[in-house]
Amino acid sequence: MNTVVVVGSSLAGWRAAQELREQGFDGRLVIIGAESHRPYDRPPLSKEFLAGTVQPDELLLGTEQEEADLNAEWRLGVAAVRLDPRRGAVVLADGSEVRADGVVLATGSTRRTLPGEADIPGCHRLRTLDDAMALREDIRAGARVVVVGGGLIGTEIASTCRSLGAQVTLVDAQHLPLARTLGIELAPLCFAQHEDHGVRVWCGTPASRVLVEDRVTGVELADGRVIPADVVVVEVGAEPATRWLRGSGLKLRDGVVTDSGCVTSLPNVVAVGAVARYQPVHRSHTVRSDHWSTAMNQPPVAVRNLLAGHTVATYTGVPHFWSRQYGSTLQFAGYAGPKDRITIVDGSLKARRFVATYQRRGRTTAVFAMNSPKQFAVHRRRLVTALAPSPAPLLART
């Protein structure tokens, strides 16, 4: 390969670029990013950065020397709009194109929206550094903040806004948010923290639209109720950024479908991070992971396969994530299902300091911990060992 293009300049793209050099690629390396910023870390945006304890330069993933060592061409502030495999070209929004022998897809995900929210003063989403900076300027003590969406990012935002003295209301369409991830036994503990810290929680009725005069005035729910607001943050989920890949010949199904080595149906195109729907070696069906750990750990395998021209290695990482809310640490790893049996193996629910494991047909599938980081590490290692695949031929692509 003479030229490799990495499309996406967040963590997964940055790690892929590093791996290309570390694994011996010495050709032309082009990094394309829709944002104008150099690669930065996103998890602190909803926590430390929003709280004002971390500044933009502290989020950067690489030093000046590390960027220089990449010897890459940077095309930042311009999005990729089309992949043309026949011509070996990535077409950009400004009309230019980059010819490539190999492509790494690392475009991540885009946030879903609510009717009436676009470009409204006081209405925010939180995906980029610019989003976080705008939201940080709007949060003040006493402000009425409505967070629409009770997922991990939404709950982190609610926690941070409350710590800054805002009056916070958390809204979610589900009766028990996080139940799909943690199970109906454990999800209530996470939401009890919000109520304990003075956050109003309205669950079971979806938000239908954002209300506006000169700026945001509130959120209307599907049943007609209105929640007044000075600031609204919409975090109603995300979807993989694959629209620009339509017509490319790649298989798209809630992400770019890959095999267990992150290789797509085109052997010179790999996908990593939140945009990749990959085939885990631990499961019989494909999955997609929005988590930091996946974006961090998939690129070494994907790059090895890209440079080899076919799948020679499989990704064996087990998804995991963590969150900090109201001073509590939440950690999860594995593949929990709605019918898994949950067992408290350390600590107690009452003390909100425990480790729980999930079992399915006598096998541990996941582990969750609240305020027990050391014990979580122990059980996570056991989980990885339990899920480790036995030596077998590479899984076929789906």
Image (spheres, grey):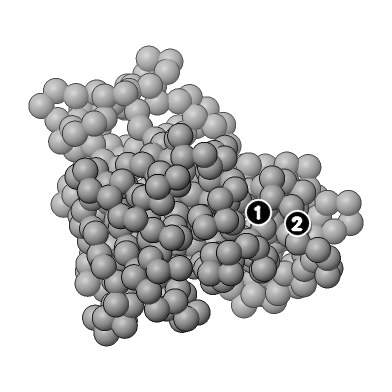
Determine crowd level at label 2: few under 14, some 14-19, many 20+ residues with C-alpha closer than 10 A: some
- Mark 2 belongs to which amino acid? Leu
- Percent across and percent down for residue 287 are 63, 48
The front one of 192 and 17 is 17
Residue farthest to the right, as pictured: 362
The front one of 28 and 347 is 28
Q: Residues under labels 1 and 2: Cα distance? A: 7 Å
The front one of 274 and 345 is 274
| Marks 1 and 2, the one that precedes in the sequence | 1
- Percent across and percent down for residue 10 are 36, 61
Element at badge 2? loop
The front one of 92 and 347 is 92
Whether 246 is drawn above or below 36: the answer is above
The residue that label 2 is drawn on is: 395
Q: Residue at x 28, y 37 (%)?
A: 232
Indicate left or right for 80 with 174 as reference.
left
Disc 1 to disc 2: CB gap under 8 Å? yes
- Mark 1 belongs to which amino acid? Asp
Q: How many marks?
A: 2
Residue 222's quadrant in the figure?
Answer: top left
Indicate left or right for 388 with 323 as reference.
right
- Percent across and percent down for residue 359 are 81, 55
Element at badge 1? loop
Q: Is residue 6 visible?
A: no
Indicate left or right for 281 with 69 as reference.
right
- Percent across and percent down for residue 254 are 54, 39
The residue that label 1 is drawn on is: 259
